[in-house]
């Protein structure tokens, strides 16, 4: 599973990365996490408001920081 965090490195982006890691670890998933910080790359996903969560090329959330429990539901 490839998880991408879309954002420029702001506090919300870091929090999303932290929550996503907690959720994926809690589910026992094998994953690779990548932070996408380039604005052109972020916009290529159609995301205009960061942070964004992308799993295997599919945008799951944008513009918010879901709780680890909510992310578990998205990943599960």
Image (cartoon, rainbow, N blue to C red):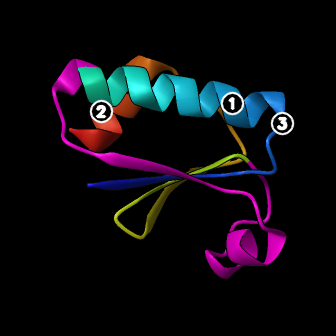
> Which mark, by number, is residue 73?
2
Gap in Å between the C-alphas at discs 2 and 1?
20 Å
Q: Check the image and report above or below for 43 versus 4.
A: below
Label 1: which secondary element: helix
Check disc 3: other Cα within 10 Å, few if <14, some if 14-19, many if 20+. few
> Considering the image in quadrants, where does the C terminus appear?
top left
Residue depicted at x 66% and y 75% = 46
31 displayed left or right of 68: left
Picture coordinates of residue 40 (x, y %)? Answer: 79, 78
Residue that numbered label 1 is attached to:
14
Q: Which residues are magenta?
A: 26-50
Magenta span has 62?
no
Label 3: which secondary element: loop
9 displayed left or right of 18: right
Query: Can residue 1 be seen by looking at this rendering?
Result: yes
Picture coordinates of residue 47 (x, y %)? Answer: 70, 66
Check disc 1: other Cα within 10 Å, few if <14, some if 14-19, many if 20+. some
Residue that numbered label 3 is attached to:
10
- Closer to the camera: disc 3 or disc 2? 3
Q: Check the image and report above or below for 32 versus 56.
A: above
Using the rendered view, name the quadrant where residue 9 is placed: top right
The tag earlier along the polypeptide, 3 or 2, is 3
């Amino acid at each position: 599973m490839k998880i991408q965090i879309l954002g420029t490195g702001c506090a919300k982006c870091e929090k999303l990365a932290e929550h996503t890691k907690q959720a994926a670890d809690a589910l026992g998933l094998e994953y690779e996490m990548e932070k996408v910080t380039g604005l052109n790359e972020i916009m290529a996903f159609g995301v205009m408001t960061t942070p964004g969560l992308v799993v295997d090329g599919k945008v799951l959330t944008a513009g918010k920081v879901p709780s680890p429990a909510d992310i578990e539901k998205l990943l599960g």
